[in-house]
Amino acid sequence: MARSYNKLWKLMIDKKINKTQLRNAAKISSNAMAKLGRDEPVSISTLEKICEVLKCDIGDITEVYSEDRNDE
């Protein structure tokens, strides 16, 4: 299974918040933010902190899909 945080980046643009602001507000590490940028796994608690700041649900910031899906 693979994951994508593209929804997170789009939501951040909509809410006019940058990565540094989100990292500070959610109190997450720069390492966690880097993992998000590389679509690597992060803990559910990290995602919950982000959701709390952005006032959204986990499904609003990430999606999980089969690695063999066809990208266009």
Image (cartoon, grey):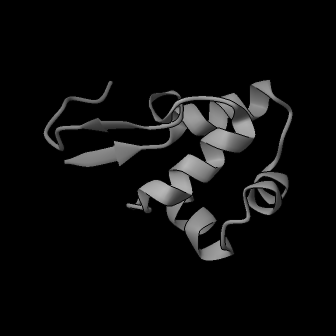
- Up the image or down, 1 lies above or below 12; here it is below
Q: Please name whichever residue, 36 or 28, is drawn nearer the observer in this view of the structure.
A: 28
Question: Image point 61% across, 40% down: which residue?
Answer: 51
Horizontally, is 48 left or right of 9 in the view?
Answer: left
Horizontally, is 60 left or right of 72 in the view?
Answer: right
- Up the image or down, 35 lies above or below 18; here it is below
Farthest left residue? 68
Question: Image point 67% across, 41% down: which residue?
Answer: 52
- Up the image or down, 71 lies above or below 22; here it is above
Horizontally, is 39 left or right of 56 in the view?
Answer: left
Horizontally, is 8 left or right of 42 in the view?
Answer: right
Quadrant of image for the C terminus: top left
Q: Position of residue 13 (x, y in %)?
A: 76, 31
Number of marks: 0
Q: Position of residue 33 (x, y in %)?
A: 62, 63
Question: Image point 26% across, 48% down: which residue?
Answer: 2
Q: Position of residue 16 (x, y in %)?
A: 86, 33
- Up the image or down, 6 lies above or below 2; here it is above
Rendered image quadrant of residue 59: top left
